[in-house]
Image: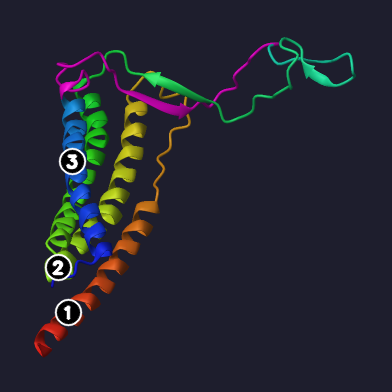
Amino acid sequence: MTTIDSSSAGRGGAVKLLEPLLAIGMVFMLAGAVAPILDRPGLGLLGDTRPAVDAVVDFDVDFGDRFETRSGDDGVVVDAATSQAPVEIGAPVTAHFVFVEPSASQRVIWLIPSVLPPLLALAATWQVFAIVRTARRGDPFVAENERRLWILAFLIGLGGTLWSMVSGFSEMLLLQRSAAADMTEIAATISFLPAIIGLGVAVLASVWRVGVDLRDDVDGMV
């Protein structure tokens, strides 16, 4: 008589559900990479989207008497215009700069950081998809999956950090080549969070290597 482990069957069903979900996600990621190219900043075939950058302005913003306060009937200080809790506007103030007629170089500079994230996500998801596919077949601890995990670690760590650098410098270049060059605090920021996450995946790949070795040892004993 054959006995079916219900917990294993449940995990197998979850893996089978995850595989098409990842496939659908990759389709959307591919569309996310193609859309900016076809949109107005690229070829202008889809819509009227224009490249834009949010940046901190380097001048004082005067809101006039909009946020003046007064004492209410109960002596509590409230906003003079709305009688609500008062607020103050302080630095930094961020403005949304839209490039009305971007040049060809500005379009390229804007497109690169727009296309890079979905392409990186697509490549990373493909590695996960391949790992899930081997898990569905019942043997995830194989050397190919260790290699996929290392590729995933590099895609997240190096690719994510590269995107952070490219995104920051592209925004800086866009502003420097515009009429807003003398109106903003132009600076590029880099996030090292992707590198930390990539390091975590690299640790997982190292642990996976142990699982592969254990499986090979067991196979050698049989």
- Residue 158 among magenta residues: no
In the image, residue 10 sits, relative to residue 216, either above or below, namely above
| Residue 74: x %, y % from top left | 90, 18
| Residue 36: x %, y % from top left | 21, 26
Colouring: rainbow
Residue 219 picture quarter: bottom left
SS for dot 2: loop
In the image, residue 177 sits, relative to residue 146, either above or below, namely above
Disc 3 and disc 2: Cα gap in Å? 23 Å
Mark 1, other Cα within 10 Å: few <14 / some 14–19 / many ≥20: some
Disc 1 and disc 2: Cα gap in Å? 10 Å
Mark 3, other Cα within 10 Å: few <14 / some 14–19 / many ≥20: many
Q: Which residue is mark 3?
A: 26
SS for dot 3: helix
For the residues labelled 3 and 2, say whether their Cβ atoms are less than 8 Å apart.
no
Residue 45 picture quarter: top left
Q: Which residues are magenta?
A: 38-65
Q: Residue at x 13, y 81 (%)?
A: 216
Q: Residue at x 23, y 19 (%)?
A: 103
Which quarter shows the C terminus?
A: bottom left
- Residue 59 among magenta residues: yes
Q: Is residue 143 visible?
A: yes
Amino acid type of the residue that numbered disc 3 sits on in the rendered structure: Met
